[in-house]
Amino acid sequence: MTTEFHETTSRPFLSSVLDYLPGMAPYLFHVPYSLYLAAKHRGIFLPALSNPSILTGGMAGESKTDLFGLVGPYARGFFAPFITVHAGDAPDSFRNELDARGIGYPLVAKPDIGRNGRGVRVVQDEAELLTHLRSFPPDIRMVLQRYIADEGEAGVFYIRKPSETHGRITSLTLKYFPAVEGDGRSTLRELIEHEPRPKSVIHMYLRRNKRFLDQVIPRGKTHRLATVGNYVRGSIFLNGEDAITPEMTAIFDRISKDIKEFYYGRFDVRFSDLEEFKHGRGFTLIEFNAASSEPTHVYAPQTSLRRIYRDMLAHWKLAYEIGAENRARGYAPVSLLTVWQVVRDEAKLIDRYPDEE
């Protein structure tokens, strides 16, 4: 790992301004701005056309398996391999498929349709995998994916209008997993409680590490508090806009063009060396998300509330513009009622998932 990334991930915990605001604070102006954009473009919910090959453009209900079905052979080579199973399947039914895809343990098990990292877990062996799968209703589709151990993780937001020859990276978020370092005297609970993060985040760390809270962490040993690169699961986000390069942009442009009718969304990436990643090399794609994606650099520390709203609304404006172009290309508009029904169905599905630890 390069010194630059190592130093970034070693900084003390910092909090975004959004840690101290209500959960819907980033979307305060979305409704009035959406009404303005809908009137301007004469379309009620055009972001649902931003990726016309994806259900509601990816606003909700997007299946990881279905999304991967849109990926062409060039882009496919960048994705970590996975298989899809049902939570109630017997291990005999998928062991051979895991072997055939070169997926060993540890692996990542996650719902095929999910949000905010709910139900995502790194499992160390088959016994732990089965315990996790059995915590879901048996009919729930699950993705079992090769675990990429690289320490670097990033969110790459890509946008291209259908009328444009080339797209661009509009947001790069560098993520890292918070960890505490033991002193040989303090329990994990004590180490967590002394971290300078909001109480809501501290409570989440305590809940997700409850099996280890009474253990004394040896001096110099680190204990990772989160394993999912998601802000609401406690990961730390940093604005990586200075690391965006023409080489990085070119490779993501080529990958995105190999995904059927994909114009607006975010790639989740693992990498080991930031300098290599900046040159468009040495990275693995975990998954990609479409119109529901956010430019997650807004969650980075030191991001002002003014910039949060500016950047969120700028991306939303582009979603409308892309949807308007796709409508002009002949794609049928998606009604707000349809989007609402998909959102409702997704929420009902996720409510069936087990409670988070």
Image (cartoon, rainbow, N blue to C red):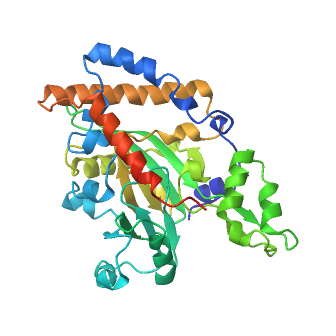
In what quadrant of the picture does the N terminus appear? bottom right
User: Where is residue 282 shown, x and y percent of the image?
Assistant: 41, 63
Picture quadrant of residue 94: bottom left
Residue 8 is situated, as x and y percent measured from the top left of the image, at 63, 53
- Identify whether 296 is placed above or below 115: above
Q: Quadrant of the C terminus?
A: bottom right
The residue positioned farthest toward the right in the image shown: 185
Query: Which residue lies at the image location 50% right of the left edge and 22% below the top edge?
Result: 29
The image shows residue 329 at horizontal and vertical percentages of 13, 30
Q: Image check: 339 left or right of 72? A: right
- Residue extending farthest to the left is 330
Quarter of the image for residue 79 reads bottom left
Can residue 62 be seen in the rendering of this structure? yes
Q: Specify whether 255 is left or right of 310.
A: left
Depicted 214 relative to depicted 306: above or below:
below
Vertical placement of 18 versus 354: above or below?
A: above
Residue drawn where x is 43% and y is 56% of the image = 269
Q: Nearer the viewer, residue 288 or 25?
A: 25
- Number of numbered markers: 0
Residue 159 vs residue 126, the one in the foreground = 126
Left or right, 95 with reference to 309: left
Give how far across and how far down residue 255 sits, in percent: 27, 52
Kindly tell me whether residue 125 is visible in this rendering: no
Which residue: 44% across, 22% down? 31
